[in-house]
Image: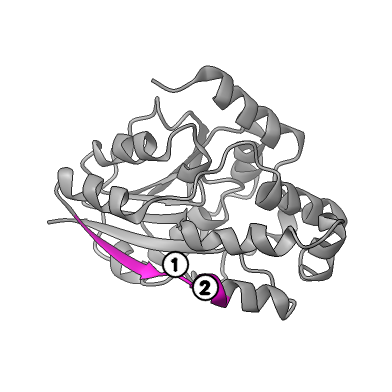
């Protein structure tokens, strides 16, 4: 059972300033999907559910490039409103992932589960849907480099601005700063626990991409922001 007060805190956090809110005309869904090994996991699937779709950029790109039915869900209605306005083939509804049933054979969730009240309960909830494949973006222990880097600075916001010059506006930059450094709920996953859950439900887990602590720190020190996201593919054994 999820803690309602924690979910409310997360919902309030995103309602105040959704971290991925951009102008509708800046969502170019024809851009390529550069996620590692994503083509392998998407190819041959019949339908896709994106859990935590945000403004719908990924769902819409999937619909455009793969011509596969895609449905995105998100906790925040403002995100869903924008996703629906800019839809290029995907569909979207507001939903709590713990109360939603994904009927697709491929589930995608990028940067979401580690922001739930319990990342392992959230993952097990998705695994119980019995999709053929899952594709996950999660923070693991290497992400600690981000916090260690910014802890060097008295004014973290000022430093964040200096290494994120490609973000679209000050509001967009501020919202990403909040998401990256001030989120009320974030857990760095234990890879062994993720592997154990995958095996329990009959999935083979592959680590598709990860950066080392030192590589993330070096990137930050060189003025290029890296969040430390790792990517995992799960496939029915």
Q: Which of marks 2 and 1 is in front?
A: 2
Residue 64 within the segment the image draws in magenta:
no
Local crowd at mark 2 within 10 Å, few (<14), some, or many (≥20)? few
Viewer-proximal residue among 149 and 49: 149
- Number of marks drawn: 2
Residue 172 vs residue 213, the one in the foreground = 213
Dot 2 or dot 1, earlier in sequence: 2
In the picture provided, is 61 more to the left or to the right than 122?
right
Instruction: Confirm or deny contact between disc 2 and disc 1 (CB under 8 A).
Output: yes
Q: Name the residue under label 2.
A: 32
Residue labelled with disc 1: 65
Q: Does 167 appear above or below 136?
A: below
Q: Quadrant of the C terminus?
A: bottom left
Region rendered in magenta: 204-215
Magenta run includes residue 205: yes
Local secondary structure at mark 2: loop
59 left or right, relative to 132: right
Category of crowding for the residue at label 1, using alpha-carbon neighbours closer than 10 angstroms: few (below 14), some (14–19), many (at least 20) = few
In x, y percent, where is residue 140?
A: 46, 57
Mark 1 residue element? helix
Q: Is residue 101 visible?
A: yes
Identity of the residue drawn at 69% across and 65% down: 149
Q: Position of residue 101 (x, y in %)?
A: 33, 31
User: In the figure, residue 88 lies in which quadrant?
Assistant: bottom right
Q: Quadrant of the N terminus?
A: top left
């Amino acid at each position: 059972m999820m803690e309602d007060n924690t979910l409310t805190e997360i919902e309030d956090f995103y309602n105040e300033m959704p971290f991925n809110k951009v102008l509708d005309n800046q969502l170019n869904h024809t851009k390529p999907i550069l996620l590692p090994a994503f083509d392998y996991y998407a190819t041959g699937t019949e339908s896709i559910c994106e859990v935590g779709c945000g403004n719908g950029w990924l769902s819409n790109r999937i619909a455009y490039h793969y011509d596969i039915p895609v449905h995105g869900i998100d906790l925040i209605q403002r995100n869903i409103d924008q996703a629906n306005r800019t839809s290029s083939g995907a569909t979207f509804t507001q939903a709590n992932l713990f109360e939603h049933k994904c009927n697709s054979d491929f589930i995608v969730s990028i940067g979401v589960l580690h922001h739930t009240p319990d990342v392992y309960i959230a993952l097990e909830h998705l695994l119980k849907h019995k999709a053929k494949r899952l594709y996950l973006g999660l923070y693991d222990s290497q992400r600690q480099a981000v916090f260690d880097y910014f802890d060097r600075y008295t004014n973290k916001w000022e430093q964040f601005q200096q290494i994120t010059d490609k973000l679209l506006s000050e509001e967009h930059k501020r919202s990403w700063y909040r998401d990256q450094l001030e989120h009320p709920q974030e857990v760095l996953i234990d890879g062994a626990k993720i592997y154990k859950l995958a095996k329990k439900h009959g999935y083979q887990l592959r680590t598709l991409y990860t950066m080392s602590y030192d590589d993330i720190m070096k990137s930050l020190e060189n003025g290029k922001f890296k969040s430390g996201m790792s990517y995992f593919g799960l496939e029915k054994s």
